Image: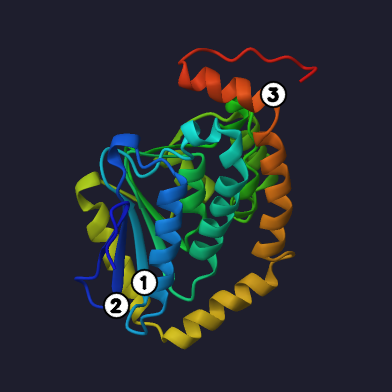
Amino acid sequence: MNGTLVLLDQEEPHISMLSLNRPDKRNALSIDLMTELCETIETVESDPEQRVIILRGVGPVFCAGLDLHEVAIPEKAEESAKLVAKTLKALSTTSLVTIAAVHGAAMAGGAGLMSACDFAIAETSAKFGYPEVHRGLVAGLVMGFLARQVSGRTLREILLLGETFNSEKAKQWGLLNEVTEAEHLIEHALKLAQSVIKGAPGAIDLTKKLMEKLEPRSIEEELQQALEFHVHARESKEAIEGVQAFLEKRDPVWKKSD
């Protein structure tokens, strides 16, 4: 299987390289792209020869987050939100080990994709951020994954300020396993994948399942509750203003009564 929005490369034994292929839109998460990504993960997972998924992006950035042009369409809000949840769950709960190889930027939902993976490697110049509050949105669907990786104070700094931060800060906060020069990014991701393959597949699968069981709440429970908040925020007047302001390249005008 090799679609147009998600490219699949299986040249390396037991390793599936999945590339988000919407470079003209900075790999923004559209309904079509997320649908194809979920289908590709399912296809790879059904192949007993595959052990590792490396997720990367084509073009200047890894992923800029949700397609805000779609977010601005009320009729698509619920479908898009449910697909975000499905995509994050697919990446997190697959029996394969997932590695995010981040270049350029991973913002909002793009940073969420990274957080849902088992490992994350980024180039030194990469940028990260969860700017949802600046758009009148709530980073609800990615919050559970982020909360599993950073402490309370850091979580608040990331989500309530919505500011962009660099690879050094992301590594310091525990969001990255490794930072490397851009020209070595995929090389290091493949090296990590080769280390994973040395482990027994059944043992790795069971280890992932046990780690999930040891969490206070399951990913599915977290995503279900988060979906309610996410959809509510998307339908608010603040979201309409915040997204429109972003698309019009102006500062949003907030009204507390909204």
- Depth check: give the residue in front, 49 or 153: 49
Distance from the alpha carbon under mark 3 to that under mark 1: 42 Å
Asked if labels 3 and 2 touch by Cβ distance under 8 angstroms, the answer is no
- Going by the numbered disc 3, the residue's amino acid type is Lys
Which numbered tag is attached to residue 148?
none
- Mark 2 or mark 3, whichever is nearer to me: 3
Image spot of residue 143 (x, y percent) = 63, 47
- Going by the numbered disc 1, the residue's amino acid type is Val
Image spot of residue 92 (x, y percent) = 53, 64
SS for tag 1? strand
Task: Please say whether residue 175 is visible from this viewpoint.
Answer: no
Look at the picture and state if 203 lies above or below 74.
below
Q: Which residue is mark 1?
A: 52
Look at the picture and state if 245 lies above or below 139.
above
Q: Residue at x 77, y 17 (%)?
A: 256
First-in-chain label (3 vs 1): 1
Circle 1 packing at 10 Å, graded few (<14), some (14-19), many (20+), is many
SS for tag 3? helix
SS for tag 2? loop
- 193 with respect to 171 (left or right): left
First-in-chain label (1 vs 2): 2
- Going by the numbered disc 2, the residue's amino acid type is His
Q: Which residue is mark 2?
A: 14
Circle 2 packing at 10 Å, graded few (<14), some (14-19), many (20+), is some
- Depth check: give the residue in front, 172 or 219: 219
- Depth check: give the residue in front, 9 or 12: 9
Image spot of residue 28 (x, y percent) = 41, 40
Q: Residue at x 40, y 50 (%)?
A: 33
